[in-house]
Image (cartoon, rainbow, N blue to C red):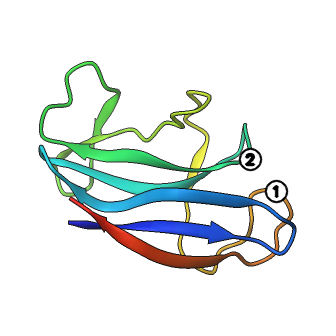
Amino acid sequence: MGNLLDVSCPCGYRAEGLCEGGLLGGKVAGVFACADCAELVSALVYSANPEGLDRRVSVKGQLVVVPRCPRCGSADVERWSSGAPCPRCEQPLAAEIVGIAD
């Protein structure tokens, strides 16, 4: 199970329904800031069935999915966590857990 997050910034930027954590079907998502489209997005970081996805071997020897922005397809994404800056104005974002992702 994971969390559904809504984030907001004083500049007016909002991202709703971001998924961070486990999902059904052997998939795990994380929240990332995309450098190309300046959006926060949920992107796969692990899939039990990675066919057709870019993948690489992690430090622990597991196959992991190369995270890509689902909006623009860019791989220029960086892991985002609560309190990290807004992708548009660099102010700290407020994150609120609004549900459970399963």
From the viewer's side, name the closer residue of 79 and 37. Answer: 37
Residue at 33% over, 48% down: 45
* 50 lies above or below 2: above
Residue placed under numbered mark 1 in the picture: 88
Q: Residue at x 51, y 34 (%)?
A: 70
- Using the image as rendered, state which of residue 1 and residue 89 is in the foreground: 1
Foreground of the two, 59 or 82: 82
Residue at image coords 27%, 18%? 52
Q: Quadrant of residue 33?
A: bottom right
- At 68% from the left and 48% from the top, the residue drawn is 39
Position of 101 with respect to 19 (left or right) is left
Task: Label 1, secondary structure: give it.
Answer: loop
SS class of the residue under badge 2? loop
Residue that badge 2 annotates: 38
Crowding at dot 2, Cα within 10 Å, few <14 / some 14-19 / many 20+, comes out as few
Q: Counting residues from the N terminus, which is met first, the one under dot 1 or under dot 2?
A: 2
Q: Quadrant of residue 85?
A: bottom right
Quadrant in the picture for the C terminus: bottom left
Q: Where does the image place residue 55, in percent across and percent down from the top left?
A: 30, 33
34, above or below 32, in the image: above
* Dot 2 amino acid type: Ala
Image location of residue 26, percent across then percent down: 13, 47
Looking at the image, residue 49 lies above or below residue 102: above
